[in-house]
Amino acid sequence: MRRIGIVGGLSPESTVLYYNYIIKGFRERFRSEKYPEVLIYSVSFGRVVELMRSGDFKGVARELLKAVKSLAAAGADFALIAANTPHIVFNEVSSLSPIPMVSIVDALAEALKRDGITKVGLLGTKLTLTKPFYVEGLRKHEIYAVIPSNADIEVIDEIIFKELTLGIVKESSKDRVKEVIKGLVSRGAQAVALACTELPLLIKGKYMVKLYDTARIHAEKALELATA
């Protein structure tokens, strides 16, 4: 089996989800405890957020590349960034990485295409929803994104950074996000992608439309590659 490298800490809450998804997924699939080795490099979440909010994306790429190189030196066969927003610099990091990297956008697109989804609602941070990397990344796969209103984007961004990244889950926030999902569906979304790896902490269960947990999808892709 191939060794999985994870750039984690973005946030710590989602890193735990990734690890659990990989291990539980292996147990369910193979009925065995001989799961792949997983290496995690936990970056400074505050440092990366600070760089992103200041617009220093070269600095973000530098921090993530350092983590990937450390994973490669430790023996990882491939790496993934356990978060959506930092994929804003995925191409830059991937082009300089000494090992293959797995894109969360491509993994999501693969899952959507498998289910025949061509128009998907996106929920995520302000940067994920307002920068072109996610929308354009999906469009390359002929999948079109429906984005919340500017006001809803601000609300969701605040819920993510002031609550979910700290492990805080509020019923009021859950109700607010449900309303945003209804709006995306009313605008033609066939499904909704939780394009923030913390959102599964808040949004669970059955809704009026299928929800795609990008953290789970990304982790499952890593497991698939590790056991191929």
Image (tube, helix red, strand yellow):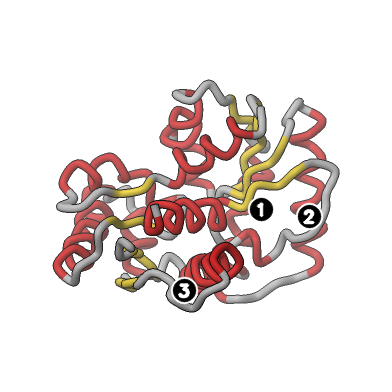
Image position of 157 with respect to 128: above or below: below
Q: SS for tag 2? A: helix
Total marks in image = 3
Residue pictured at 48% horizontal, 25% vertical: 141
The reply to whether residue 70 is in sight is yes
Q: Amino acid at mark 2?
A: Arg
Quadrant for the N terminus, please.
Answer: bottom left
- The residue singled out by tag 1 in the image is 155
- The residue singled out by tag 3 in the image is 12
Of callouts 3 and 1, which one flags the residue occurring earlier in the amino acid sequence? 3
Q: CA distance from mark 1 to mark 2?
A: 9 Å
Viewer-side residue, 215 vs 194: 215
Using residue 26 as the reference point, say whether residue 208 is left or right of it. right
Measured from the top left, where is residue 67 in percent x and y? 23, 64
Query: Given this view, does label 3 or label 1 mark the residue nearer the observer?
Result: 3
Residue pictured at 57% horizontal, 71% vertical: 31
Residue pictured at 64% horizontal, 53% vertical: 156
